[in-house]
Image (cartoon, rainbow, N blue to C red):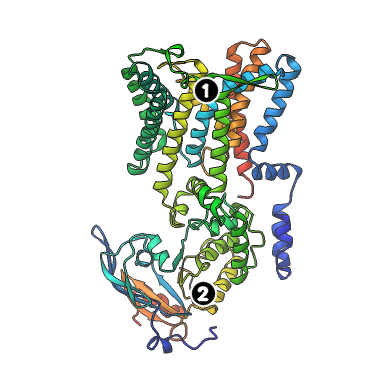
Amino acid sequence: MTQQQTAGPPSAGHADLAEEFLDRQTPLSRIRNILHRYPALSPALVLLIAVVVFGLLNDRFLRVENLSLITQQVSVVGTLAIAQTLIILTAGIDLSVGAVMILSSMVVAQLAVNNGLPAPVALLAGLIVGLAAGAVNGFLVTRFRLPPFIVTLGTLNIFIALTLLYSNGATVRGSAMPGLLTWTGTTFPVGGVRISTGVVVMLLLYIAIAFILGKTAWGRHVYAVGDDKEAARLAGIAVNKVLMSVYLAAGAVLAIGAWIQIGRTNAASPNAGVDLNLDSITAVVIGGTSLFGGRGSVWGTLLGALIVGVFRNGLSLAGLDVLYQTLAVGVLIILAVSIDQWIRKVKS
Amino acid sequence: MTMTEPAASHTATREPILKARNLVKTFGRVVGLDGVSLDLYPGEVLAIIGDNGAGKSTLIKCLTGAEVPDSGELFVSGKPVHFKRPQDARAHGIETVYQNLAVSPALDVASNLFLGREERIPGPVGKLFRVLDTKGMRRKAKEELTRLGISTLQDVTVPVENLSGGQRQAVAVARAAAFGSKVVVLDEPTAALGVRESNQVLQLVRDLRDRGLPVILISHNMPHVFDVADRIHIQRLGKCAATITPQSHNMTDAVAIMTGAATA
């Protein structure tokens, strides 16, 4: 910004001086500007510090097996958080992500095991469930103009009820499923470390969504809609179409999350993952994506999910009670949002 | 103040770029527009003034597709048109800068200029993966800003929220004037700006006019209107009370017509 000011017309010297006075940079404001420009920087620093500290506290922490375990532990939440990021970028919020994922996983498991459908067909049905759930959320948000919070609070309960009705509350064990369904739970060795297939699927999703958000017109429209809906509409963007497509994309991501969940837990359980809704929001917020929309990235979300995973794992290795993990996550959320608010104060 | 001949003299001979006839728009029992006609000629600045509730905004919205008039006709370059959405007006080269500054703060200048009409990289990769041509759009954004004579925006990669009010307005005006538009509509472009920034925007309006682009300017600010306008359309109670020029009337006359204390 300083360069711009000095590049201004020389005739308006006084006004420029005044503006430079207002813009005068302190070391703190310089840090703030850098964080503003690169929103994934602060979660990256937090993750780095956390890894170093937990590594010093317990030498088991930095072992590759443990680090591999952390990535497996975050693979489900990490995937749900991709869907959550998409929706939060549009200034929405999705409380139903966990419920949609569980519903999709139950449909996949039941169709494959109880109805004997081939595994690819069952997975396709799961994808359709995810898309349909996204369509319901998107339809209510765009057509009835209901706040996403209320819509997804309602559908959260509806999807939980549907899941329990459909499954009669019964868990389907992984041993009964065709191999393709639990494929995401298998591991393969890479130079002595066992890497989970589910983690790879999650990372591929991150790469795909990051590419779409960063490099395509659709991605830019998602940011524009979240930034200022009215401005986007006036710029000729079909806001409702963009919102609808975001909810559909989120539904598809959740269906893939369901697949990863089946592999990770080696089961499809209707009672699993009710708290995954809030965990996904936590990952997004800690990852530096603004709850007010239009700002953030999926890479930040991945970092956010890893931070939560690292804290939980590190604190339990340090021998602390599980309640302290929860407490630490709470503190992290508030810190992350405070930093976001502070960063947003850049020249406004 | 105008270097050109008085606009009134060529209105009889030239074909208006934008022509509206008997526009009517009601909102329930409220009459927003009560049979308004308007002509916009090439290379002129037409100001629209009027008291609150006189129908300025409704008139503009009908001209730019944001509202659909109940009845009346619109012509662009002599051809009848019907705008159902702002995109329809855009497709006919009518670009609008709204009062609330329709720019996306978190996106950079180039992204804002191309918002809603992004370009992909040429070739199969761009088609298949729909990859945006970020570099190309930045280059074209710079060229377009230079062509429009907007010098306040040096760096097209800065997020718009880091710009001053005048610079943001310049982004919005540039977006409206760029890429072969025929008419630029500015709704209260100086309302939120300081003196120096207002002057920059008014200069921008003159520059656009001098490049042959007709401008419709809605403003409450009489000195600004009399400074840049070639003709002034005065709305009163949903009707056009008069169309005057800065040469034929002074500001006091205009205010008198606006409030109904006098007629043209």
Residue of label 1: A184
In this view, which residue lies farthest toward the left?
B29
- Residue B25: percent from left, percent from top: 28, 64
Q: CA distance from mark 2 to mark 1?
A: 70 Å
Query: In which image quadrant can residue A300 be found?
Result: top right
Where is A141 relative to B14, above or below? above
- Residue A121: percent from left, percent from top: 38, 27
- Residue B109 in sight from this viewpoint: yes
In this view, which residue lies farthest toward the front?
A118
Please give the chain letter of the residue carrying mark 2.
B
Q: Nearer the viewer, mark 2 or mark 1?
A: 1
| A329, B125: nearer the viewer | B125
| A170, A98: nearer the viewer | A170
- Identify the residue shown where x is 63% and y is 64%: B142
**Kind of residue indicated by mark 1:** Thr
Q: Is residue B126 left or right of residue A67?
A: left
Please give the chain letter of the residue carrying mark 1.
A
- Residue B164 in sight from this viewpoint: no
Q: Is residue B18 left or right of residue A257?
A: left
Specify the label residue B223 is tagged with.
2
Quadrant including the N terminus of chain A: bottom right
- Residue B18: percent from left, percent from top: 38, 75
**Kind of residue indicated by mark 2:** Pro
- Identify the residue shown where x is 42% and y is 38%: A247
Q: Alpha-carbon neighbours of circle 1 within 10 Å: few (<14), some, or many (≥20)?
A: many
Query: In which image quadrant can residue A18 be found?
Result: bottom right
Specify the label residue B24 is tagged with.
none
> Do pointers 2 and 1 mark residues of a single chain?
no
- Residue B144: percent from left, percent from top: 59, 67
